Amino acid sequence: MVREVTGAMATPRRGGNPGSELGAGREGAGARADGRGTLRMRPIRILRGVLAHAEGSALIRIGRTQVLCAASVEERVPVWLRGRGQGWLTAEYGMLPCSVPNRAQRGKTSGRSFEIQRLIGRSLRAVTDLSVLGDRTITIDCDVIEADGGTRVASITAGWIALHDCVERLREKGLLKKDPLKDRVAAVSVGLVDGAGILDLSHSEDSRAQVDLNVVGTAGGLLVEVQGAAEGDPFREEDLRMLVRIGRRGLAAMLRAQEKALARPPSPGVDLVKAP
């Protein structure tokens, strides 16, 4: 596999383990197991309004990964927000039992799932004026139908679509005086695999990445969160900069997928199995 190298491997610190720090990562267009170049996304498709009973809903597909997001509204806020004149926006995340090779337990929120749903909630709240919601709570439920990497970033991206349609329905009913959404938000995964910076990791790539990063950003070009860690040896700041730069390419693709979804009418009652 050939890569275009844009950064030289760093010399290890004197007296240190030669493998104790990753060198400056490489960024190129080599082929991956699925035939993609290192900077190419898997096909993305978002369908809106797929659930008749939800206030807003969206089904997202990124390659084999599929996540169904649905918005619901409660005319109340958490106890700690009562009397403050603002609403609340939260998220829940779960994996259907057969979304992964080994059956996921139904009804049990793992530490991983709890951390992911907090990330989804933070990302959506970052672009929402909660004071406009009034004394109500919007919950975005994100259910993973099939997992092949990138479920959290798919949840954020499709979760915003579900939130958007939920807000539009509340406005049509006259329950909101103005639009609480300040911007769009999306997310993408990036990582260092075999020393190369790659975009949109599949599960097999994620499981062997030296660095795994999730980049959350707005349509206006601002970053909401950069979440990641070394999976072994530490990595350099220039690797982080490179991964964020790659992530911005992926964010542009996710935001375009949102735009296409918004340009199409909702698809109520769509067959989730046969949906293109």
Image (cartoon, rainbow, N blue to C red):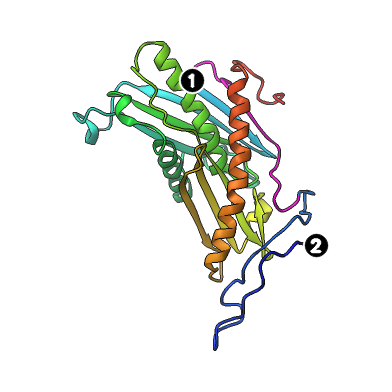
Q: Could you say which disc has been placed on residue 127 in the image?
A: none
Whether 97 is drawn above or below 192: the answer is above
Q: Give the amino acid at mark 1.
A: Ala
Q: Is residue 77 left or right of residue 182?
A: left
Pick whichever, 209 or 273, lies toward us.
209
Q: Where are the magenta residues, as a range?
A: 37-54
Q: Residue furthest top?
A: 173
Q: Give the amino acid at mark 2.
A: Val
Residue name at image x 59 percent, y 17 percent: 266
Q: Could you say which disc has been placed on residue 2 in the image?
A: 2
Q: Position of residue 260 (x, y in %)?
A: 63, 26
* Labelled pair 1, 2 in contact (Cβ < 8 Å): no
| Prevalent SS, magenta region | loop
Pick whichever, 32 or 140, lies toward us.
32
| SS at circle 1 | loop
Residue name at image x 46 percent, y 40 percent: 120
